[in-house]
Amino acid sequence: MPQKSQVRNGQALDIRALRIEAELSISELASIAGVEETELRKAERGLDLPEGEFLERIAHVLNTDPKK
């Protein structure tokens, strides 16, 4: 079973990769999704594990399934 930090880092990289693929800056994604830029930065760096409405909003803007 992966350690918690590995799971966080994997998820953080996914958000960042999808954001870059969508050609959005962190502040653009945060603004469009209606989330705090600081929280998005934490999620991308793996310092916070996003879930719930936050993750749904990000996934919607990035056109992906939040359960992936």
Image (cartoon, rainbow, N blue to C red):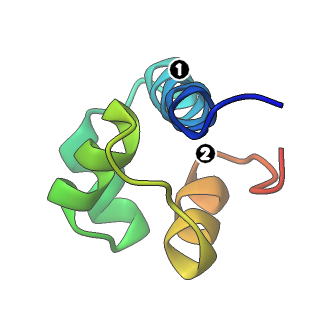
- Residue drawn at x 76%, y 46% as measured from the top left: 64
Q: Residues within 10 Å of mark 2 (few under 14, many from 20)?
A: some
Mark 1 residue type:
Ala
Q: Quadrant of the N terminus?
A: top right
- Residue drawn at x 27%, y 47% as measured from the top left: 42
Q: Looking at this view, is 4 or 68 the one in front?
A: 4
Residue 36, position as x, y percentages in the image: 22, 68
Relative placement, left or right, of 49 versus 34 is right
Relative placement, left or right, of 48 versus 17 is left
Residue 31, position as x, y percentages in the image: 26, 62
Q: How many marks?
A: 2
- Residue drawn at x 37%, y 36% as measured from the top left: 44
Residue farthest bottom in this picture: 53
Q: Which mark is residue 63?
A: none
Q: Looking at this view, is 58 or 45 the one in front?
A: 45
* Residue where numbered disc 1 is placed: 17
CA distance for labels 1 and 2: 10 Å
Relative placement, left or right, of 29 versus 21 is left
Q: Quadrant of residue 24?
A: top left
Mark 2 residue type:
Leu
Q: Quadrant of the C terminus?
A: top right
- Residue drawn at x 48%, y 33% as measured from the top left: 12
Q: Looking at this view, is 2 or 43 the one in front?
A: 2
SS for dot 1: helix
Residue 41, position as x, y percentages in the image: 24, 44
* Residue where numbered disc 2 is placed: 62
SS for dot 2: loop
Q: Looking at this view, is 46 or 17 the one in front?
A: 46
Residue 14, position as x, y percentages in the image: 60, 28
